[in-house]
Image: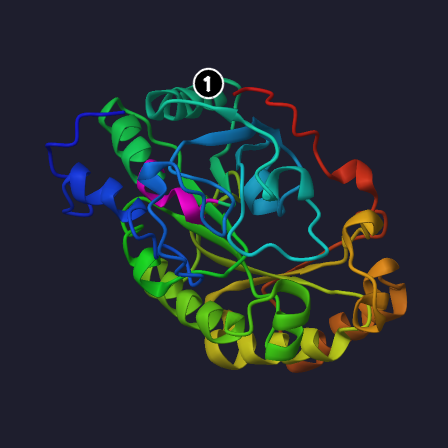
């Protein structure tokens, strides 16, 4: 795959040690412990073979991420969280994507830069952290200078986030649940609230307060936390909002998402999932927004109506891979 004899100059880990993280894999909180280097797939649905489903400019992220030229978005196949309402189901279950060598990943970064990308946006990256670290290192050694965005569900180990220091400029993370019962019902991850809060603390420690480019308005460094407001779950969304503001104040940006799209064929039957079969109402979304405004939150992004359409979900057709 690559010469693993030299130390990674930022993490201090040898390449051999870095890629050995796939053995007895505990990169994410699932800690499934399989040997992905031997071809075994973890809870993320992937072995250590690198699969990417799309690499293209994306214009629908937060304004400080997409800017006017688009974010250079790399969608990795697989996912360590696996929500029952997943919007990217085609790739999250590891059923699509193209296998590429490590060297190709760094090439993709340069190709996106040539297309005018504002940054490189790594989507569902958790289970490929060793590849990501090495590819960024390789690209920077060849003069690559765009910032890297780590776009995650938030279900992370703080120890894994620590490895990213010096590589990742912006964390674009979710905080899906504070209610552990919701985390269990919808993502089979009752420990999500604790793990996500620990990881977020490490992200903030890594980047500090947000820094923006004065000319473009693009975020150069910082943390954005997304709250996907789910139908029937406004109470949890408001609790998340309050937690974030009381903990981080204006040190982070909060992005309130109203884009939930029910992918009905994927949602299990049963009363506890019934609310997920419909779209979010305007009343529900505005209830959360009003709560945020009453708290005094100013560093926030809000979405207009129409973002819940399936057309906002990109085609995972191996474009740019």
Residue 128 percent across, percent down from the top left: 40, 42
- Residue 179 visible in image: no
| Residue 267 versus residue 39 in the image, above or below | below
Looking at the rendered structure, the number of numbered marks drawn on it comes to 1
In magenta segment, residue 129:
yes
95 lies left or right of 166: right
| Image coords of residue 275 (percent x, y) | 84, 67
The residue pinned by badge 1 equals 111
Residue 191 lies in magenta, yes or no?
A: no
Please, is residue 41 above or below residue 178 in the view?
A: above
The x and y percentages for residue 259 are: 76, 52
Tell me if residue 85 can be seen: yes
Q: Residue at x 18, y 44 (%)?
A: 17
Name the residue: 32% across, 38% down: 37
Q: Is residue 192 above or below residue 72?
A: below
Indicate the colouring scheme: rainbow
Residue 18 position by quadrant: top left
**Foreground pick, 20 / 257:** 20
Graded by Cα atoms within 10 Å as few (under 14), some (14 to 19) or many (20 or more), the crowding at tag 1 reads some
Q: Residue shown at 73%/80% (left/top)? A: 235
Q: Which residues are magenta?
A: 125-131
Give how far across and how far down residue 137 sits, in percent: 26, 34
Q: Nearer the viewer, residue 226 or 269?
A: 269
- The quadrant in which the N terminus is found is top left
Q: At numbered mark 1, what does the secondary structure look like: helix, strand or loop?
A: helix
Q: Main secondary structure of the magenta part?
A: helix
Q: Reply above or below: 206 against 145.
A: below
Q: Is residue 37 left or right of residue 221?
A: left
Q: Quadrant of residue 107?
A: top left
């Amino acid at each position: 795959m690559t010469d693993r004899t030299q130390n990674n100059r930022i993490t201090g880990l040898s390449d051999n040690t870095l890629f050995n993280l796939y053995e007895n894999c505990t990169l994410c909180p699932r800690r499934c412990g399989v040997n992905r280097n031997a071809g075994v797939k973890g809870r993320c649905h992937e072995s250590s073979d690198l699969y990417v489903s799309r690499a293209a400019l994306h214009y629908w992220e937060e304004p400080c991420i997409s800017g006017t030229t688009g974010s250079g978005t790399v969608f990795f196949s697989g996912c360590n969280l696996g929500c029952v309402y997943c919007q990217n189901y085609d790739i999250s279950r590891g059923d699509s994507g193209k296998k590429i060598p490590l060297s190709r990943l760094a090439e993709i970064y340069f190709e996106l830069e040539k297309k005018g990308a504002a940054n490189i946006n790594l989507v569902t990256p958790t289970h490929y952290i060793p590849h990501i670290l090495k590819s960024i290192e390789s690209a920077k050694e060849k003069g690559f200078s765009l910032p890297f965005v780590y776009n995650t569900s938030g279900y992370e180990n703080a120890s894994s986030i620590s490895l990213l220091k010096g590589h990742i400029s912006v964390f674009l993370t979710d905080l899906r649940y504070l209610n552990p019962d919701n985390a269990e019902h919808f993502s089979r991850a009752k420990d999500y609230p604790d793990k996500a809060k620990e990881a977020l603390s490490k992200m903030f420690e890594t980047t500090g307060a947000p820094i923006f480019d004065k000319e473009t308005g693009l975020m150069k460094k910082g943390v954005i936390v997304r709250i996907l407001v789910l139908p029937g779950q406004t109470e949890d969304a408001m609790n998340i909002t309050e937690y974030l503001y009381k903990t981080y104040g204006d040190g982070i940006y909060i992005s309130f998402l109203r884009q939930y799209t029910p992918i009905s064929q994927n949602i299990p039957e049963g009363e506890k999932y019934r609310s997920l079969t419909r779209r979010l109402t305007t009343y529900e979304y505005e209830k959360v927004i009003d709560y945020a405004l009453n708290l005094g939150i100013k560093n926030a992004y809000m979405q207009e109506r129409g973002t819940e359409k399936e057309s906002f979900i990109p085609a995972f057709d191996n474009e740019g891979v």
